Image: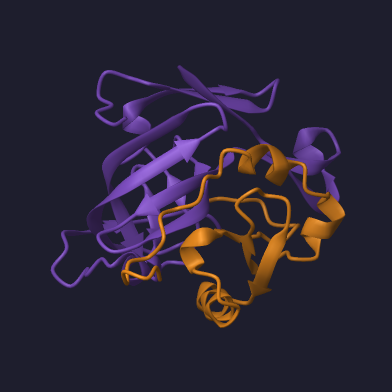
Chain colours: A purple, B orange
Amino acid sequence: MTLRFRYILEGVSHAVVPLGGRWVRPRPVIGVTVVGPSNSRLRMALLDTGGDDTLFPESLAPLLGIDLTSAPSGTGKGVGLGPVPLRYAQVGLRITDGKEYREWTGWVGFTPAPLRYPILGFAGCLQFFTATFHGDREEVELAVNRLYAGT
Amino acid sequence: MNENGKPPPPPDIGRFHENWIAFPREERLKYAGKFVAWSPDGLSIVVSGDSEQEVEEKLVAMGIHPSQVVGENIPPPDEALFL
């Protein structure tokens, strides 16, 4: 019923003061399969409850067979970034923790803005899940909610 | 591509996450700032490059369809993420 993902402990080259001097940054990054009209790609993406949209780099769209020429558009803004253009398309998304799989269709944004990680934000992803972030266990649990219409 | 001209279906990544988070940290740090392609089992990095496009081209040259690997832009080690 619930997918569980342990955080990756990203190594750093100096002690992280706000984490009590640890030498790692725990991050909820998971693998996601993105399925377009003619192709698919697998990408590591950050679960981000602060993200309004699910976002991927614009360069991914043609690899999936998505033409963004007349796609619905919008604007986004991240920390330290000016307004960036977003263009939206529907894709198939699939995640697994090795025990269970979830697959659904969602609207995602594509942006030319530099992204360290694609973002699994509210629209297109977290709207379909009850997400529990266990800070102590450094693990996230995802359980589908009543809006989830996937498999 | 398959014989019918269609791309292969996405690989099973059921074992990926547990292996990916256990990948040696020191080894992973060598790829900081790079775009890498992971094997579907998360045990190894197949190829790396400075960009997604470069990695895609290397994979094709190796005869590997880019849909059969897991792409990750490994962040630099001293960068707190604000997206």
Residue A137: name its quadrant. Answer: top right
What percent of the width, then of the height, locates residue B7? 37, 65
> Considering depth in this image, is A81 or B1 the residue closer to the camera?
B1
What percent of the width, then of the height, locates residue A140? 57, 27
Does residue A30 appear to the left or right of A70 in the view shown?
Answer: right
Q: In this view, does A125 lie above or below B80?
A: above
What percent of the width, then of the height, locates residue A28? 59, 38
The N terminus of chain A - image quarter: top left
Number of dots carrying numbers = 0
The residue at the point 32 percent across, 67 percent down is B6
Q: In this view, does A64 lie above or below B51?
A: above
Does residue A142 appear to the left or right of A93 in the view shown?
Answer: right
Residue A50: name its quadrant. Answer: top left
The residue at the point 78 percent across, 48 percent down is B23
Q: In this view, does B9 lie above or below B14?
A: below
The C terminus of chain A - image quarter: top left
Does residue A45 appear to the left or right of A128 in the view shown?
Answer: right
**Residue A51 in view of the camera:** no
- The residue sitting at the left extreme is A70
Residue B27: name its quadrant. Answer: bottom right
What percent of the width, then of the height, locates residue A149? 24, 28
> Considering depth in this image, is B41 or A63 the residue closer to the camera?
B41
The residue at the point 34 percent across, 62 percent down is A39
**Residue B80 in view of the camera:** yes
